[in-house]
Image: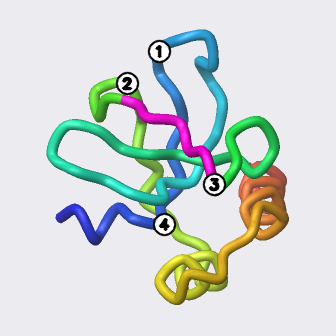
Amino acid sequence: MLKEIKGCFATSLAGHDKGQMYIITEADDKYVYVCDGKNKLIDTPKKKKRKHIQLINRKDAEVESKLMSGTLINEDIKRAIKLIKAES
């Protein structure tokens, strides 16, 4: 299941960033590591407990493929988040 959520969108449920949308870049049993491309960059992701995020079961194909190949950049994350917010 950990690989399945990698690349998914998520919204913060708790903390000073409540309501902020992120993309999950890494996950382990207790934590997820999220980036928004603006405040939390791909090089320094935010560590959040799983219970403090709301998973949005959607992925951006371009972001997912670049994440798996290791070529994901912050501009890709910002673009994907902007597009999903525009759809809502």
User: Which label number is shown at residue 43?
Assistant: 3
User: Which label number is shown at residue 52?
Assistant: 2
Q: Alpha carbon of mark 2 to alpha carbon of mark 1: how far?
A: 5 Å
CB contact under 8 Å: marks 1 and 3? no
Secondary structure under the numbered disc 3 in the rendered image:
loop
Q: Is residue 68 left or right of residue 83?
A: left
Residue 26 in picture, x, y percent from top left:
39, 57
Relative to 43, does residue 53 appear above or below in the rendering?
A: above
- Going by the numbered disc 4, the residue's amino acid type is Gly
Mark 1 vs 4, N-terminal side: 4
Mark 3 vs 2, N-terminal side: 3
Relative to 76, does residue 50 appear above or below in the rendering?
A: above
Q: Which region is colored magenta? A: 43-48
Q: Within 10 Å of the Cα at label 3, are there few (<14), some (14-19), or many (20+) other Cα atoms?
A: few
Q: Within 10 Å of the Cα at label 2, are there few (<14), some (14-19), or many (20+) other Cα atoms?
A: some
Mark 4 vs 3, N-terminal side: 4
Residue 19 drawn in magenta: no
CB contact under 8 Å: marks 1 and 4? no
**Which tag is nearer the camera, tag 4 or tag 3?**
3
Q: Alpha carbon of mark 2 to alpha carbon of mark 4: how far?
A: 17 Å
Q: Nearer the viewer, residue 85 or 33?
A: 33
Q: Within 10 Å of the Cα at label 1, are there few (<14), some (14-19), or many (20+) other Cα atoms?
A: some
Quarter-of-image position of residue 11: top right
Name the image quarter holding the N terminus: bottom left
Residue at 39 percent of width and 65 percent of height: 6
**Which tag is nearer the camera, tag 3 or tag 2?**
3
- Going by the numbered disc 1, the residue's amino acid type is Ala
- Going by the numbered disc 2, the residue's amino acid type is His
Residue at 59 percent of width and 18 percent of height: 18
Mark 2 vs 4, N-terminal side: 4
Q: Disc 1 designates what residue?
A: 14
CB contact under 8 Å: marks 3 and 2? no
